[in-house]
């Protein structure tokens, strides 16, 4: 659709621009300090888990079945925590290790393991010369940071509503032994909120990598983060792999970061028997056992998948109005102008906004001037380089509804102003 500004006469465009500049000045004078940058739960959301803090007292029985919680033991995590984690992602508890409070930390540790030690006895990546990771883009910036940190080449892969471009993924993974992994957020992807189709999951499970030490980093961070009763359905990649006889291909990660407390929850990794043994040996060199008091509290508080679903419905009641406000404000402000599109997620933590080519950096900078912090333009692309300079990630959960509404008004004004200024500039 052509931009509304493009079809205006010079006089109409000047009038429109003057009005938008006046709006911008009025907003600037409000000295706002609003933040839509990072995917954090709101204080009301984290408050939902405060009752968990009352479950453990000095009188609590600190055993989990026969396992002492108050001492070294259970290097793979408490049995009740492993059962909960396994049930949430649909795998056998024997294939899960619950360790620490950050899934990103586990992802980093497994990249470091592959890089320095080698996957299942293969030559370490650091001794293999140039190695590459596929990065469906836009994607989660911190994933890309992990691989870039080790000097691994991040290669962008186009994303569509049904997942990454699988023709491109197959071509690269099956032809090039330097390709060692791919970052995936298969449900409510960060930042689009897309869920991979069954066909995409099946094609991932059917990959025949050229490299024996290639692994899919399946970051199921938003496995239970539905905004509506009817959530997106993601095919269980381990079920599909099992149908084909099972292979050592996938590391799946998840955590309770956005179920209970970010940074203070429990995180886990699931993998095939062979891979989990390899991971176990790696973790054994790092620590005697994981922190288990928090695991005990989580298992007592959340209990099982049904308990988590009930808890997540309370999160959804808080997060959903914010997502709906984003939809309403963007639609009211921008629908029909031919300058923008955005995603309509039914879960997760983000909305992806897409402006005209060459505007994202200017919009983010102008929004900042007007008092609203957004994720840096380009941050969702490897090396911060959005080739079209058009993607902006919106994170609506943290601000109050009132602050979010104000931030979105500023954002809409910034988008229109940048687009109208660009049109004016192109006519001079
Ligand atoms: C896709 C994705 N994975 C992982 C994380 C971080 O999870 P954790 O706190 O368990 O390290 C985030 C946080 O925003 C995320 O969006």
Image (spheres, rainbow, N blue to C red):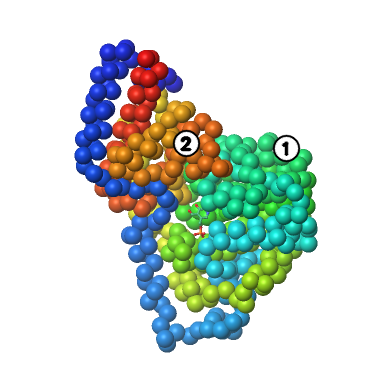
- Kindly identify the residue that appears in the image at 56 percent across and 54 percent down: 220
The image shows residue 141, relative to residue 265, as above or below, that is above
Residue visible at 73% across and 54% down in the picture: 125
Near-viewer residue (169 or 332):
169
Determine the secondary structure under disc 1.
helix
* Side of 399 relative to 248 (left or right): left
The quarter of the picture where the N terminus appears is: top left
The residue shown at (42%, 19%) is 2
Residue 176, image x and y in percent?
76, 42
Residue 286, above or below 367: below
91 left or right, relative to 273: left
Q: Residue at x 29, y 52 (%)?
A: 400
Report the front residue among 381 and 170: 381
- The reply to whether residue 290 is visible in this rendering is yes
Which circle marks residue 391 in the picture? 2
The residue to which callout 1 is attached is: 171
């Amino acid at each position: 659709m052509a931009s509304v500004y493009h079809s205006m006469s010079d006089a109409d465009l000047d009038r429109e621009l003057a009005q938008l500049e006046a709006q911008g000045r009025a907003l600037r004078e409000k000295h706002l300090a609003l933040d839509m940058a990072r995917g954090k739960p709101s204080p009301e959301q984290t408050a939902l888990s405060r009752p968990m803090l009352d479950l453990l007292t000095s009188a609590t029985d600190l055993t989990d079945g026969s396992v002492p919680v108050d001492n070294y033991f259970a290097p793979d995590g408490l049995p009740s925590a492993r059962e909960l984690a396994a049930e949430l992602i649909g795998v056998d508890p024997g294939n899960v290790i619950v360790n620490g409070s950050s899934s990103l930390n586990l992802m980093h540790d497994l990249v470091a393991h592959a890089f320095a030690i080698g996957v299942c006895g293969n030559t370490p990546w650091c001794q293999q010369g140039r190695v590459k990771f596929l990065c469906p883009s836009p994607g989660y910036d911190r994933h890309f940071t992990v691989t870039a940190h080790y000097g691994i080449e991040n290669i962008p892969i186009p994303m569509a509503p049904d997942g990454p471009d699988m023709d491109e993924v197959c071509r690269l993974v099956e032809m090039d032994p330097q390709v060692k992994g791919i970052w995936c957020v298969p449900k409510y992807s960060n930042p689009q909120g897309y869920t991979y189709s069954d066909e995409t999951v099946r094609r991932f499970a059917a990959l025949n990598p050229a490299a024996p030490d290639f692994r899919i980093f399946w970051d199921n961070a938003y496995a239970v983060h539905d905004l509506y009763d009817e959530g997106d359905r993601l095919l269980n990649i381990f079920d599909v792999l099992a149908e084909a006889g099972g292979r050592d291909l996938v590391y799946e990660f998840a955590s309770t970061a956005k179920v209970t407390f970010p940074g203070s929850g429990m995180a886990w990794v699931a993998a095939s028997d062979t891979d989990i043994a390899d991971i176990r040996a790696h973790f054994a060199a790092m620590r005697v056992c994981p922190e288990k008091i928090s695991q005990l509290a989580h298992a007592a508080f959340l209990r099982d998948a049904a308990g988590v679903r009930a808890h997540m419905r309370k999160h959804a009641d808080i997060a959903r109005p914010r997502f709906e406000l984003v939809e309403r404000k963007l639609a009211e402000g921008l629908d029909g102008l031919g300058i923008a599109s955005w995603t309509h997620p039914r879960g997760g933590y983000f909305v992806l906004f897409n402006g005209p080519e060459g505007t994202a950096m200017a919009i983010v900078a102008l929004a900042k001037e007007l008092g609203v912090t957004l994720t840096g333009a380009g941050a969702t692309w490897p090396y911060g380089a959005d080739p079209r300079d058009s993607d902006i990630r919106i994170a609506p959960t943290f601000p109050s509804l009132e602050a979010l509404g104000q931030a979105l008004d500023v954002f809409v004004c910034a988008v229109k102003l940048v687009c109208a200024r660009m049109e004016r500039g192109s006519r001079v």
